[in-house]
Image: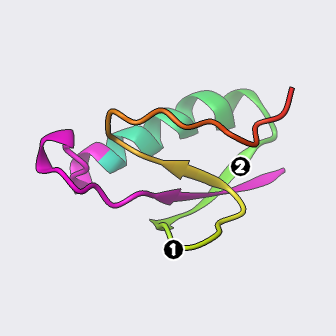
Amino acid sequence: MNIPVCWERQESPEFNNTFNNRVLTRRAIEQSWEKASLVRFTGWDWCPSGYFNGVRVSMGDRSESHGLGK
C-alpha cells in the first residue's frame, strides 16, 4: 500500500524544517512503519497549496488530523 507524503513549508524558522531534519524523519518512517508493514510512503516533496490526497508532514506547533477516520 503506497501512501503519498509531502512536507508543509514552515512559516517560522524556529520549527527546524531543515533538510537534515526531513532526512531524519524520513529514515525513522522507513525503519519503523515501512519495515514492520506493507505500507510504503512515497513522494516526500513540498506540499501543494491546495488539496493533497496523502499525509502532510509539518514540523510546527499545529496539530491537524481531520479526515483520519475512525
Residue 3 lies, in percent from the top left, at: 73, 53
Q: Amino acid at mark 1?
A: Pro
**In the structure shown, which secondary structural element does the residue marked by tag 1 occupy?**
loop
User: Is 15 in the magenta?
Assistant: yes
In the rendered image, which residue does mark 2 sit on?
Answer: 40
Point 84% across, 50% down: residue: 1
- Residue at the image position 48 percent from the left and 47 percent from the top: 57
Reply yes or no: does residue 18 show up in magenta: yes
Magenta residue span: 1-21
Q: Nearer the viewer, mark 1 or mark 2?
A: 1
SS at badge 2: strand
- Tell me the quarter of the picture where residue 10 sits: bottom left
Q: 53 or 33: nearer the eye?
A: 53
Residue at x 62% of width, y 36% of height: 65
Residue 41 position, x and y percent, is 65, 51
Considering every residue shown, the one lying at the far left of the view is: 14
Q: Mark 1 — residue?
A: 48
Q: Position of 34 compared to 67: left or right?
A: left
